[in-house]
Image (cartoon, grey):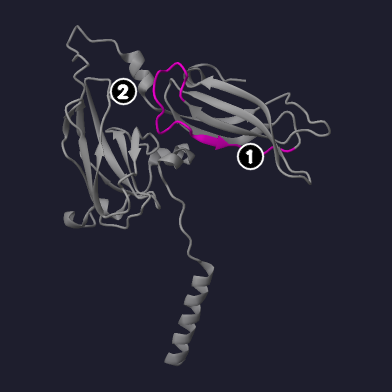
Amino acid sequence: MSTFLLASVAREHLLAVRRRTPHSRPYTVGPDSLGSLSSESAGVGLQRANSDTDLVTSESRSSLTASTYQLTLGQGHLVISWDIKEEVDATDWIGLYHIDETCVANVWESKNRGVNGTQKGQVLWRLEPEPYFMEAETKICFKYYHGVSGALRATTPCITVKNPGVPVSVEGQVEDQSGSEHCRKLVSFTLSDIRASGLKKGMFFNPDPYLKMSIQPGKRSGLPKFTHHGQERRSTIIANTINPVWHGEKYTFVALMTDVLEIEVKDKFAKSRPIIKRFLGQLILPVQRLLEGPAVE
């Protein structure tokens, strides 16, 4: 085969590949969409960028640093600086985590203001005692994530945060804080095989029910609204029934024990008419009761 013919065939092949793979902008992976991760993927975490491996030199590796690694609450603040070597995007974000946390969805706080797609930059981070720094000493770190791919670009070393308002425990005088600490920790849980029964019928037909579920702060918790609040999941629609069962569907949430899970049952139908949504019922469950009690019917 002649050189000209080989070049022509190769060019046609390349054009065919390009036609099959049109360019499109990937889905943004940010703090607000972390709840949509499955429990399995959340446990493993998002992919790590190539710069955070031993395949590159330290000079070409992305870095995330803090202005100090010993901070006393009320006596200063943190400045988090980044130097990213790989691709960046305006949707990049930085998350605050407990040093032992491995689940990307269990972020305490996050910021993308100031993280505006520049290779280098910094953001001011003020830490408040509640609800995460209620012990005499808490160890944390910050993680920088690429907003488009979700890749972990860089992580700070361990930062020790001291709360002078909490007395240091000594032998024989250990303060019992297990109850309050338990309520301040984020927990992950998964609901499956949800069912409803005896839903209200329409005048001429049965409803087409679906579930709308969300995590909200408990009214009596006294805590402000945090990043994980407002997580929302929607089930599939079960057609023409007053006793729906969502077999095999799983919904994972991250919440505090003081939060509540709101479940709404709605009717969505479009039988040769505009889509109409009807409220069929609501259930509000404290997360603590949901996790500690028997299965809720």
- Say few, some or many: other residues with alpha carbon within 10 Å of mark 2 (under 14 / 14 to 19 / 20 or more): few
Determine which quarter of the picture holds residue 139.
top left
Which residue has dot 1 on it?
Answer: 236
Region rendered in magenta: 217-239
Q: Is residue 12 magenta?
A: no
Determine which quarter of the picture holds residue 134.
top left
Q: Residue at x 78, y 28 (%)?
A: 201
Q: Nearer the viewer, residue 226 or 206?
A: 226
Q: Residue at x 58, y 37 (%)?
A: 234
Disc 1/disc 2 C-alpha distance (Å): 37 Å
Give how far across and how far down residue 171 sits, in percent. 17, 10
Tell me which numbered mark, 1 or 2, is placed earlier along the sequence. 2
Q: Residue at x 46, y 52 (%)?
A: 27
Residue type pointed to by label 1: Thr
Residue 130 image label? 2
Q: Residue at x 50, y 17 (%)?
A: 289
Residue type pointed to by label 2: Glu
Determine which quarter of the picture holds residue 207.
top right
**Would you place residue 260 above or below residue 110 in this image?**
above
Q: Nearer the viewer, residue 61 or 69?
A: 69
Mark 1–mark 2 contact, CB under 8 Å? no
Give how far across and how far down residue 191 sits, in percent. 54, 30
Q: Quadrant of the C terminus?
A: top right
Image side of residue 2 versus residue 122, left or right: right
Give how far across and how far down residue 220 sits, in percent. 45, 16
**Would you place residue 27 above or below residue 17 in this image?**
above
User: Callout 1: helix, strand or loop?
Assistant: loop
Magenta portion: prevailing SS class: loop
Q: Residue furthest right?
A: 204
